[in-house]
Each structure stands twice: as structure tokens, then as C-alpha cells.
Image (tube, rainbow, N blue to C red):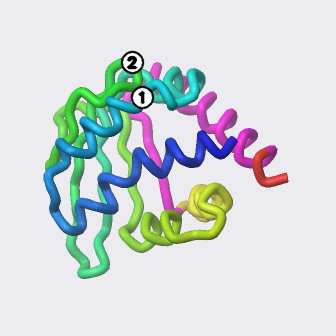
Amino acid sequence: MKRIFLFLILVMMPVALAAEMPPLGQFKDNYNDNIDKVPGFVKRILGSERINALVLLENGDQLNISLVTKKAAIESLDYGMLENPTLIIRTTEKTIMDIIAADNPGKRFKEALNNKEITYEAQTFFKKIKWGFNSLFLRLALWFGSK
């Protein structure tokens, strides 16, 4: 279960780091070099997606990061927005930093999902079905993981 939380935090890490505007290629390379450590079912959940992450920064600006995955590997990670994303994630800089700094990041992530501090919206019919099942699975995993 800890691997799931670590993976979710790792996916959000470039967003957190982007507040400082570093090159994202380094994170992409590090993640892809260690993809064998990501649990198989998480790879299936992430799969092949075109993700736009929209982060409201503390200063009121919005940071946009685009992420394209194929078989759970990051093909591209950059600032800006993708055309025709399959998934849109919305959160705040504060939420990401709170999760990273938490004593129990998994619990804090669960709270953020439950409190709608992190939201996601599938953009196509089939992706809505996929993410509906993923949402149920993720909530069950987080619930059992917090016991």
C-alpha cells in the first residue's frame, strides 16, 4: 500500500517542483529509470493517458503541466497544456506540499481526495468508465490502507 502512495506522490512531485520552474526532463528520466518499482496494477491504472494538471499557486497564478504516459512510462512532461487530454487533474500548490510534508502522505492524499482538494475529470466516454472504476478501486485501497 505504501508503494501506491509513493507512486501518487511521485506523479504529483513534478507539479510541486514546478513552482520553482525547474527542468521537468530530469524528473521524467528518474521516474522512467525506476518504473520497475511501480506496482503492476498502478501501471495498469495509469496506463496510457494525456493529462493536464492545473495547479493553483499560492500567489494566485495557475501552473499548467502536461503529462503523456504510455504503458505507465512518461513519454512527455512539460509546462503548458495538451490539446485533447484524456484526464484533467486540479489541485493547489498548498495541497501538494501538504501531502509531501505529511507524516502519513497516504492519509493526507485520501483526505485531499475526499475533501475535493484534488479532483480529476476524464474527458472521453471510455476514460470516464475507466476512471470511474479506478476511483472506486483507489478509494477502497486507500480505505483498507488506512486501517
**Residue 136 pos. (x, y %):** 68, 36
Residue matched to label 2: 71
Is 134 drawn above or below residue 145 in the view shown?
A: above
Is 113 drawn above or below residue 144 in the view shown?
A: below
Q: Quadrant of residue 19?
A: bottom left
Three-letter amino acid code at the position of disc 2: Lys
Q: Earlier in the sequence, mark 2 or mark 1?
A: 1
Quarter of the figure with the N terminus: top right
Q: Nearer the viewer, residue 26 or 131?
A: 26
Secondary structure beneath dot 2 equals loop
- Residue range highlighted in magenta: 117-144
**Residue 117 pos. (x, y %):** 51, 64
Residue 87 placement, left or right of 140? left
Residue matched to label 1: 35
> What kind of secondary structure does the magenta stretch mostly adopt?
helix
Q: State which mark lies toward you, 2 or 1.
A: 1
Q: Nearer the viewer, residue 77 or 3?
A: 3
**Residue 44 pos. (x, y %):** 52, 21
Q: Is residue 126 magenta?
A: yes
Q: Quadrant of residue 116?
A: bottom right
Residue depicted at 37% across the width and 37% down the height? 87
Residue 2 placement, left or right of 47? right
